[in-house]
Image (cartoon, grey):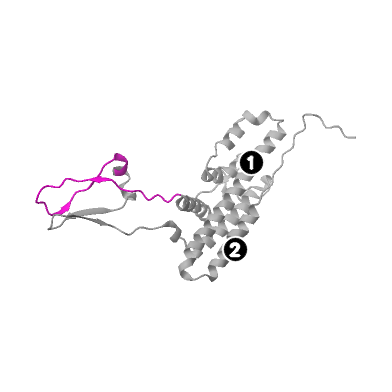
Amino acid sequence: MAHISSNTYVAISLNTVERTFETAQVLLEVGAVAPPERQRAIAASASLALTACLEQSVFNALSSYRANLLVSSGGAAERGREIDRIDGCTSLRSRVRELPQIISEGRVCLDRSEPDVRSILALIDLRNSLMHVEERALSVRFRLSEGAAGEITLTPISEEEEEGRGSLPQVTAKVGNDGRVNFIIDLKVTNPWNSVSLIEAELYRRVVRRYIDEIVNCPTESLEPGRSGLLRIP
């Protein structure tokens, strides 16, 4: 009978990345045959699924590498610099950028000048805009003199609104001949869920697949610029 000591360590990793990727592909297939007025919403949904897939794969890769560090060191690496660096990657963008350099132990890093890398980072920006649609209300003050007519000046009440005025509704006001104040609101409001085309979503599908295949699923000893154009030597 084999003896197992109390200090035996093992790392276990499971993931459903491919199922999420298949979900994005199904959405793109649906979008290809959908009426034109519905295609952008479907493309945005597919893009969001692709970002979820990217996040799953990168998080799992870092988590697996962290677990293996702990196993190989018998837990001694828990307070080490490598563990701290992994734990310091708190956003999807930082995980995507740092993963190659962490798991290759500094041999390679992500080439941010590569067009597909820029597309991956653009996808992350898109995810953020889809998940955080900020449409602020505007509070203003104005001074109205008796008998005044024509356009009047509106001033945001808070400093925060003054600084972020570019993202606030564009409002002007005029005093009519009857003395009433008329507010004119610029209705050119865009919603990010209508901003993505199927062509763009298909590009995101391709670059996510490439990142997963060439970095996440690649054996760490094979992570070299010659094998993947997404990488460069630091």
Residue 213 picture quarter: bottom right
Q: Residue at x 59, y 62 (%)?
A: 25
Q: Mark 1 — residue? A: 63
Most common SS among magenta residues: loop
Q: Nearer the viewer, residue 171 or 29?
A: 171
In the rendered view, tell whether residue 73 sits above or below residue 135. Answer: above
Q: Amino acid at mark 2?
A: Val
- Residue annotated with mark 2: 26
Does the stretch in magenta take in 96? Answer: no
Q: Is residue 116 toward the left or the right of residue 16 in the image?
A: left
Give the residue drawn at x 31%, y 44%: 161
The reply, left or right, for residue 179 in relation to residue 29 is left
Of residue 194 and residue 75, the one placed in the foreground of this image is: 194
Which x, y percent locates residue 117? 53, 52
- Give the residues in magenta: 132-161
Q: Is residue 139 left or right of residue 45?
A: left
Compared to 50, does 62 lie above or below? above
